[in-house]
Structures are given as C-alpha cells and as structure tokens.
Amino acid sequence: MKRRALTVVIAVLTRHLIAAEPENAGLELKQTIPLPGVEGRIDHLDLDAAGERLFVCALGNNTAEVLDLRKGERVHSITGLGAPQGLVYIPELNRLFVANDKGGLCNFYDAKSWQLTGTVDFKDDADNVRYDGATKQIYVGFGAGGIGVINASDRKRIRSIKLAAHPEAFELEKNGRRIFVNVPNAGQVAVIDRDKGEATATWKPEGASANFPMAFDEANHRLFIVCRSPAKLIVLNTDSGNTVTTLDVSGDADDVFYDAKRRRLYAICGEGYLDIIEQTDSDHYKRLTKVPTASGARTGLFVPERDSIFVAVPHHGGQKAEIRCYQVK
C-alpha cells in the first residue's frame, strides 16, 4: 500500500512539473555559434537583419565580434577597443557604431571594409546605445550622468542631456518625445523630454534597487524595470509613474525584452536562467518558467521579426564563450 501511494505521489508531482514548465514556454535552441579566444564579460548585441549578421560587444576582450548567422561562425573581430559596452547597426548607412567604457570613445565603422570612419569623444564610460531611425539620431548613455545625442549622418555630437548619475538601459517613445532612463546610482528612473533636452520627472522603484535593464510596452503604457537588489521585476505606469505590480525574477539580469505578439517578457539573468513572464493583461503578470542557460549569461537580444532570442554566454570554467539562438514558438 505504501509503495502504491508513493507511486501515485510521484506521478502527480511529475504531471505538476510538466504543467508548470510547458515546453520551456515555447523556446527551442536552434543554433550555437562559438566565440573562440573571447575572454571576459560579454555586453550588448545588435543585428543586421538584411545581411544576417550579429554584432557582439566582447567587453572583457576589448573587441566587437561580427557573426555570420548563415554560416554560424565569426567572420570578423574589431580589435583595440576599450571595453565596448553598447553598439548599434545603422542599415541605411551600413555603419556600425560602438560605444566604449574606457576613454568614452564612440567609433563609427564602415560595415563592409571595417575601416574607422569617425569618432565622438564622451571622455568616459560610454555605455548603452539607442538609434532613432525617424530622426537619424543616436543616443548614448555616458559618464557620471548624461545622454549624448549624435547625428548619425555626419557623425557630429548635437548635445548632451544631464542626469543625476550614470545611465544604464533606456527606452525611446516612438509616439511621443520622452526617454525613460534607469539611473541606478541615484535610485531612480528619469523621464527626459527630448524637445526640452532635460529630465522633467523622476520615478523611484519601490522596494528594490540596482535597476539596470528596461523594456517598454508603449501601447499599454507600461515600463518594465528589472532590479538586482533584490531580484524583482517592477512594472510602472508611464502615465503616472506609479508602480502597477512587482514580481520575483532570477538574479543578475542585464537585459529584458518585451514580446508584444505573445505578451511576454524575457529577462536574461546572469544567475543562469532566461526568465519568461506572461502579461495576462497590462496590470497582471506571472512567471511561466525559467530556461537554464549558463552562469554569467546576462545579456542578449530579442528580434521579434525573427521570433528569436540571442543569449551571450561568456567563457566560465569548462563553458566556452558562445552565442546561443533560441527560436520562440
């Protein structure tokens, strides 16, 4: 009788675990691209969709890696950089823009010849980068507290917008003129008016700090902040700045992305998991599952047009540096 009861309990638990993690919530590892010789931390990524090329900031290696997704291999390395943290590919110019921590240099490269075509000097800690294709302007977080604005066409610095401390991830409104910026050392999210060129409001994450990654659901007026201390997702209403809800996540996240088609969030966490969070509606969220990745894998890129998530895995012990591509179903 005891043996039969134990069998029933195991069967029930097994069914429960399978139901709790349905097919890894629709993720399938489709491609792994090795990065031989790449050491240290890997930071942010961008994609050349037409050319099937992925660009990777190998921060600890002082290189930017160029991967051919068709061949599944690295085809070029830009060397001699100063801890590159952010980059963006500008398709209409076929230029790659790379922001460096050390020295704050931001370099433009011809994405065919890989020749350096221009440099903008922010002096220190050039970090996250965003490109506004409508205005042809590049936004760069830098230094002790600023967002720099560059004209992509002539590679000239237009202006800088002052912040209370160093900016981390930020998001640009497409149907408005605001920029939302994580400023963790000031314990705030800054709201910038692009027309005025200044921060017009600050919002404080409730119950957590070290707010690094950010994503944005503009249609539903929801901003997603992931904090590391403690590890929490905080959802803010962008009309008021008020906290809508909070949710526990895995630790050491450095990238989070919103999938509007599936109403999901993907948080890439250095603890070794990719957390998948479902948006039931704009005010309610639940964690579907956490997909095991690798220790220190905390950056990546979600490409909605390809239904793909790229995860950067650094060299750690027996784990070699590589990029993993997951297909979202």
Image (spheres, helix red, strand yellow):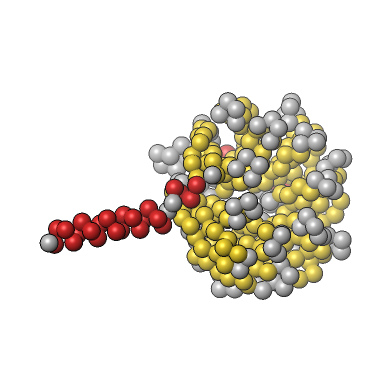
Residue at figure coordinates x 52%, y 66% from the top left: 247
Q: Quadrant of residue 97?
A: top right
Residue at figure coordinates x 50%, y 47% from the top left: 26
Image coords of residue 34 (percent x, y): 51, 32
Image coords of residue 292 (percent x, y): 44, 48
Q: Nearer the viewer, residue 42 or 283?
A: 283
Q: Quadrant of residue 107?
A: top right
Q: Quadrant of residue 62?
A: top right
Query: Is residue 191 shown to the viewer in this render?
Result: yes
Q: Quadrant of the N terminus?
A: bottom left
Q: Nearer the viewer, residue 245 or 210?
A: 245
Check the image and name the residue furthest to the left. 1
Q: Give the total of numbered labels.
A: 0
Is residue 11 shown above or below 26? Answer: below
Is residue 228 shown above or below 69? Answer: below
Residue at figure coordinates x 66%, y 42% from the top left: 305
Residue at figure coordinates x 40%, y 55% from the top left: 19
Image coords of residue 262 (percent x, y): 59, 52
Image side of residue 38 versus residue 238, left or right: left
Image side of residue 22 versus residue 166, left or right: left
Image side of residue 295 versus residue 111, left or right: left
Q: Nearer the viewer, residue 186 or 24?
A: 24
Query: Is residue 59 shown to the viewer in this render?
Result: no
Q: Quadrant of the C terminus?
A: top right
